[in-house]
Amino acid sequence: MQSQATVRKGYVAGEFLTRTWRVSGEVEIQGQPLLDQLNDHLALFLQVERMFISPLSDPAQLAGNYPTGNIRKDNLAVVALKQMQAGLPHRQGQYMGRDHVDRPVVIVVYGIEVRGAIRLHPSVNVSHFVRTTPEHFIPVFDATATIIAHPEIVFTGGAILLNRGQIEWFCLQEE
Amino acid sequence: MPRILLVDDDINLLQMVKLMLERAGHEVETSSNAAESIEHAARMNPDLAIIDVMMPGISGYDVVRKLRADPRTARIPIIILTARSQPMDKHMALDAGANAFLSKPVTSQELVERVEAVLRAGVNYRVHTGLLTEPVPPSGSSPVPPSRTTPPPGGRRPIGADDQAGNGPAPGSLPVVTVASLRGGTGSTTVAVNLAFLLATRGRRVCMADLSTTSGHVTLHVRQVAQHHWGHLLPAGDALDGDMVTRLLVRHAPSGIAMLPAPLLPTTATLSKTATGTVLAELSRTFNHVIVDAPNLDDATTTALLLSRTVVIVMSDDPPSVQSTVQFLTLLQNMGVEAGRVRVALNHARPVHDIPPEIIQKAIKRPLSAQIPFDANQINAMRRGVPLAAADPDSAFSQAIQHLARTMTL
């Protein structure tokens, strides 16, 4: 197998977007994948290491950096991850399987338009799933997140985890 | 032996990247302190610097700016390597004066390829994904003057570098394969889709552009539903930019192939020559290969044929198809498409031929590049949305596609 230069072993790097900030950082995933940590109802905050902060209006400008920090999960809009695998929960079967199909969606969450695919078994009604799943965060694969107030600012990711609690509206793109 | 300076505050990553580069025969020095790295670079005078963005105290962008501002270090080619991998980060890095941008995680092959391309191209060139090279524009903050007259010593030719009119890419200059047929039903879309999947399974970044005006079928082959298509570019006329093209791309998740679909409803409108040139040049910047499905002949497809590095004509063994192919080859010759860029593939080849391949080769006055056998599983592959090149790479069909790919200049 070809070697890779990546973030630290046991960590995943992500872009954590709130209404006003872009936080780039790494989350330890030794015990739990990131999606499971986000969906852990017992923890209000997520600990992030090697935090680098930028204002969302100028997301390439580094405004500050901290060795560790905490983000309040319910104030997150989306988390963009480079690789799809990094956005899967421990029980991957819900979102991965040989019969699963991609269902293109548009979801607006906290002023951010997310376009991508929700991957589910064909028997699952996607709208019903988004409305009723008990999970706080759901993954949208091969997705782009566009800041509606600044459409030139676009984040892409193999997976974008979005906060259901902040959804403004969503719709399926299928005909 | 090229000497490289690596700057990153993450010691483990520093060691990992150092090892990768030393294995490729480079001499590497490291610096884990961004502020000190500027003096280190001045002292060492490396052939290349690789710099992380996210470092405490001073960012990688600031390090690049300081290196560019110092006459002792202004001519060091620089690669930015960062976990911040969004498009705006790449723009920021290039604006700061970097010559290339790599996002983590990066494989050793990717890293070494890019390092060697930047070393070959030098400080006056930017090296993008797919090793496409372009001169540093004058608007960049880099003090290094761009030179459009000097060809890059390595990497690929800059897009548009040889364009006499100065307003589009030169003929045959783009990493585009146009798969075409003047006769319907020969399976040109099937060949195009399978070719794209074959290249994608080799880890290449592939985009498919379906230039059909009669309800394209590329997305049908992969069971993809597309709301966006090139028809959305028509209102903009010739005034297209990269973002407009990129926003229309549909990503096929399992293969990673990006697609620019055709309008679902047949249309008489088509992209202009200028717009097609812009679209293909833009896709060529982002992807290693662009596969164009061109089942009709109009301004858009003729432009694609002219700009493509390789043209594949798909034919079958019936008399009308042979006649169309002969006429198509004459047309390409009249258009100025060199014979060396053209391949002819006989599709649906059966044990008993309507016209034997030897006769076909005499009629078209050239050898067949591939004989692709009929495969009954093709229809099932389409139903499943997984082309045979990916679903059954050992089948005779897939082997023939692989053979065709080997004959091409990609």
Image: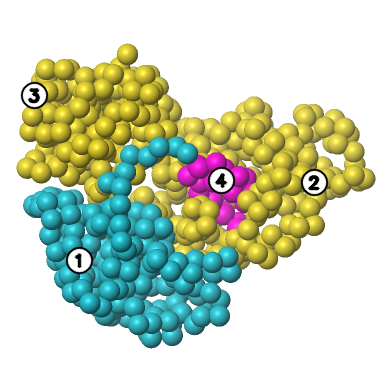
Q: Quadrant of the C terminus of chain B?
A: top right
| Picture residue at 49% right of the left edge, 53% below the top | B256
Q: Secondary structure at mark 4?
A: helix
Q: Is the residue at mark 2 from the same chain as the one at mark 4?
A: yes
Whether discs 3 and 1 lie on one chain: the answer is no
Q: Quadrant of the N terminus of chain B?
A: top left
Q: What residue span does the magenta drawing correspond to?
A: B193-218
Q: Quadrant location of residue B61?
A: top left
Q: CA distance from mark 2 to mark 1?
A: 56 Å
Chain ID, cyan in image: A
**Which amino acid lies under the numbered mark 4 shown in the image of this protein?**
Thr
Determine whether the residue tagged by mark 2 lies in a helix, strand or loop.
Answer: strand
Three-letter code for the amino acid on which mark 2 is drawn: Pro
What hue represents chain B? Answer: yellow
Q: What is the distance, in whole Å, between disc 2 and disc 4 at their CAs?
A: 21 Å
Q: Tell me the crowding category of disc 3: few under 14, some 14 to 19, or many 20 or more residues within 10 angstroms, Cα based.
A: some
Q: Nearer the viewer, mark 4 or mark 1?
A: 1
Q: Which residue is denoted by mark 4 in the rendering?
A: B201
Q: Give the percent coordinates (x, y) of residue B401.
A: 69, 42
Nearest-to-viewer mark from 2 and 1: 1
Count every numbered label the image shows and give the total: 4
Query: Is residue B216 magenta-colored?
Result: yes
